[in-house]
Image: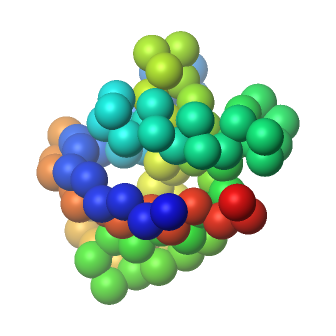
Amino acid sequence: MRIEFESVVFRWEARPETWLFADVPEELSADIAELTAPFTRGFGAVRVEATVGGTTWRTSIFPSTSGRYWLPLKRAVREAESLEEGGAVTASLEVLGV
């Protein structure tokens, strides 16, 4: 499964000093949850290969209390793609292991 979406970079309030994310739209999150239910890892994490701009990396997306998955944007990606809190981001995800 490969999806592409647009989001806004946001800071996780529980760990504001370090963690920035993009959230996957509700409908796409529901599709991912349905497809991966038998394969999810701890805390409902789903392994993905993510691409933002020219940067591709492997990570996991995590379900939030809203039901949407969150894509963590590590520092190397943010710096390479000039991503900042509140800025727009276009990401594509390849769901792995299904």
17 on left or right of 6: right
The location of residue 65, given as percent across then percent down, is 53, 14
The residue that appears at 57% across and 61% down in the rendered structure is: 95
The quarter in which the C terminus is drawn is: bottom right
The residue that appears at 78% across and 40% down in the rendered structure is: 38
The correct choice, above or below, for 22 with respect to 26 in the image is: below
The correct choice, above or below, for 56 with respect to 88 in the image is: below
Residue 85 in sight from this viewpoint: no
The residue that appears at 35% across and 77% down in the rendered structure is: 80
The location of residue 35, given as percent across then percent down, is 60, 44
**Of residues 86 and 8, which is closer to you in this image?**
8
Residue 52 in sight from this viewpoint: yes
The correct choice, above or below, for 76 with respect to 54 in the image is: above
Residue ranking furthest to the bottom? 54
The location of residue 34, given as percent across then percent down, is 58, 35
**Of residues 43 and 39, which is closer to you in this image?**
39
The residue that appears at 33% across and 33% down in the rendered structure is: 27
Image quadrant assignment for residue 26: top left
23 on left or right of 97: left
Residue ranking furthest to the right? 42
The location of residue 56, given as percent across then percent down, is 47, 79
Image quadrant assignment for residue 55: bottom left
